[in-house]
Amino acid sequence: MLLIYTPKITSRLKFVFKQICTRILGISIDFTSVIEVFIAHSGPKMSYGAQPLGSEFFIKSNGLLFEQGLSDIEISVQKWDNTKCFFYVGEKSNLPFDIFSAAFFLLSRYEEYLPHVKDEYGRFTKEHSIAHQHKFLHQPVVDLWAYKLKAALKDYFPDITFQNRSFCIHPIIDIPMAYFFKNKGLLRTVGGFFSDIAQFKFRNFYDRFLVLFGLKKDPFNTFNYIINRQKKSNQKFDVFFLVGDYSTYDKSINLNKKEFVAHIKSIRDYCNVGLKTSFLALDDFDKLKEEKNRLDAVVNSHTTKARASFSKVNLPTTYRHYVDLEIQSDFSMGYPDTIGFRAGTCTPFLFYDLDFEVQTPLMIHPYQLMDFSLLNYTSLLDKKETLIRTIQEVKNVNGTFTPIFHNYTFSGWNRWTDFKTLFNIILDSPHDVSA
């Protein structure tokens, strides 16, 4: 066990130390603010504060973990070996940066609470993130900083042991619209035919006719493919279904459609099923609760996983609602159009509510890549190289690679050509990232 002395034990401090030391590095820790207890401890120990007590292993604090509420923080990002960091504290510290305060800033999403311009969907964008502005969005910096701490501790305490973790994948599949042509209801179906004619989409008109009369399979109905790939994978997929009401933002399928319900149940037999919350439910607790109850009734169990429509997270409201509904895991923390590490990590972490200064039981599973972000690359080679490079960044720190694909990604449509190949690369990556 690593004993940590600090003059004040705060919620912020316990949150980030447990994330870095226990979840990432696999070492148990304890805290004390009593000098005599710290001195008497015979095992590995470190102090964290404004100055060391003596000649012990010491990380200097910049003070953020002892504060409450939000304030304007001056951040100077500097190069640190193969990565970057901020909150420089000088050479008297065993690490030149206060990695715990820096990690807290990223993991708590401190910058998303501060005033910023939102996009057309009301989302925080990468342009306002410190990671994008200082060009370290492509790295899981929190994990890299943790490994630098590990190296420093091993130098200081040669007999200290860490529980090693292994690289793993956590595939996510979104189902925002289970069918492209089928099960839309009379008005939407007739409207679709007229829209095809008005826009001269005669191939669409022809395909719609064949699908509706049972002569061709709906292109978005890729459930058999998902199940077959799941059967061959050791890692269970998490599949998120949108069951909210039809709106300008969400083109959902009504649960009155028996085929849709049957597909949800068939997926549930092989994969984990979660709730894709509708756009309008993100700010409406009652609507969110209704959607969760709908999915609970279909799968006949308590839904514990959620992913927000458009990856929109309204901090702290969205996550507070999840906690109130006893949703245990969220998979919305990422940028849908950009590959990278929005919270600076590839390790799941608990949501810390900055307004209440409390760690909650909601586990945030950050994703690094959505299928849409790969459309920015024209050739299969470029897509493949980008994918492998991102996987390698996660593999370097033995983290969790979490990609998000959609049911229509496997449709075989032109824009999604070769995406089954890319998905297979991901599934094979625990064995050979150079595939």
Image (cartoon, grey):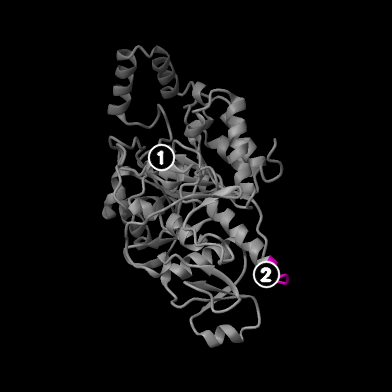
On the question of residue 160 being in view, the answer is yes
Q: Is residue 320 above or below residue 252?
A: below
Element class at badge 1: helix
Q: Is residue 192 above or below residue 56?
A: above
User: Where residue 392 sits in the image (x, y, percent)?
Assistant: 63, 43
Q: Which residue is mark 1?
A: 258
- Number of numbered discs overlaid on the protein picture: 2
Q: Is residue 257 above or below residue 413?
A: below
Label 2 sits on what residue type? Tyr
Instruction: Identify the residue at image location x=60%, y=52%.
Output: 399
- Left or right for 177, reference 340: left
Mark 1, residues whose alpha carbon is within 10 Å: few (<14), some, or many (≥20)? few
- Left or right for 10, reference 224: left
Magenta span of residues: 155-161
Q: Is residue 359 above or below residue 420?
A: below
In terms of secondary structure, what is the magenta stretch mainly?
loop
Mark 2 against mark 1, which lies toward the viewer?
A: 2
Q: Is residue 30 magenta?
A: no
Instruction: Identify the residue at image location x=34%, y=39%.
Output: 254
On the question of residue 221 being in view, the answer is no
Chain-order first, disc 2 or disc 1: 2
User: Where residue 164 sits in the image (x, y, percent)?
Assistant: 67, 61
Mark 2, residues whose alpha carbon is within 10 Å: few (<14), some, or many (≥20)? some
User: Where residue 332 sits in the image (x, y, percent)?
Assistant: 43, 48
Q: Which mark is residue 156?
A: 2
Nearer to the camera, 368 or 89: 89
Nearer to the camera, 212 or 409: 409
Label 1 sits on what residue type? Lys
Q: What's the distance in space between the residues labelled 2 and 1, CA to CA?
A: 63 Å
User: Where residue 374 sits in the image (x, y, percent)?
Assistant: 52, 31
Element class at badge 2: helix
